């Protein structure tokens, strides 16, 4: 993975997670940095299991993920598939949550797992497209 892409993903404080609703329209939410990730291949986000995003994922796994650095005019847009991972034990996860995530105090927290199919990296007025090979 390109060093600049890695830096952007590592430093982004907010990501936009886009799912498709039951009418075929995009539904975007802002999420905190991933609890876990492997390069740009997969990401794990903390979300509300009773919310619209989790509902959308259960009905349509297609989604997108976006983050940017406004100072560098750099962004990464990822296309891929999502699935919901139920939590086995919240206490283990709680240590990884930031204060904002803890304050959300979801009744039914889950993990949204995003698996990347393609990447668009925009930097210095230039876009680069990558199809991600299967691991």
Image: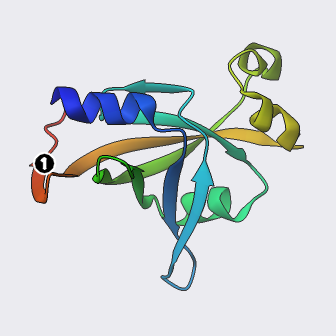
| Residue that appears at 58% across and 38% down | 45
Q: Is residue 9 above or below residue 20?
A: above
Work out which quarter of the rendered image holds the C terminus and state it.
top left
Q: Is residue 47 above or below residue 40?
A: below
The image position of residue 67, as x and y in percent, is 41, 49
Is 111 on the left or on the right of 17, as rendered?
A: right
Quarter occupied by residue 126: bottom left
| Residue that appears at 78% across and 20% down | 94
Colour mode of the rendering: rainbow
Q: Residue furthest bottom?
A: 23
Residue 96 visible, this angle = yes
Is 7 on the left or on the right of 85, as rendered?
A: left
Quarter occupied by residue 77: bottom left
Q: Which residue is mark 1?
A: 131
How packed is label 1: few (under 14 Cα within 10 Å), some, or many (20 or more)? few
Work out which quarter of the rendered image holds the N terminus and state it.
top left
Is 120 on the left or on the right of 86, as rendered?
A: left
Is 116 on the left or on the right of 62, as rendered?
A: left
Between residue 82 and residue 39, name the one nearer to us: 39
| Residue that appears at 30% across and 27% down | 39
Mark 1 lies on a secondary structure that is strand
The image position of residue 61, as x and y in percent, is 45, 58
The image position of residue 128, as x and y in percent, is 10, 52
| Residue that appears at 49% across and 62% down | 18
Residue 135 visible, this angle = no
Q: Looking at the image, how many numbered discs can be counted on the residues?
A: 1
The image position of residue 116, as x and y in percent, is 30, 44
């Amino acid at each position: 993975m390109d060093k600049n892409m890695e830096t952007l993903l590592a430093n982004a404080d907010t990501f936009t997670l886009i799912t498709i609703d039951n009418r075929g329209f995009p539904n975007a939410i802002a999420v905190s940095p991933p609890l876990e990730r492997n390069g740009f291949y997969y990401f794990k986000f903390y979300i509300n299991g009773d919310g619209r995003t989790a509902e959308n994922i259960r009905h349509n796994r297609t989604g997108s993920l976006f983050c940017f650095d406004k100072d560098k005019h750099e962004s990464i847009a990822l296309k891929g598939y999502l699935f919901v991972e139920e939590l086995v034990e919240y206490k283990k996860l709680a240590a990884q949550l930031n204060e904002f995530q803890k304050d959300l105090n979801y009744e039914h927290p889950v993990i949204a797992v995003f698996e990347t199919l393609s990447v668009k990296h925009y930097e210095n007025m230039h876009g680069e497209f990558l199809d991600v090979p299967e691991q």
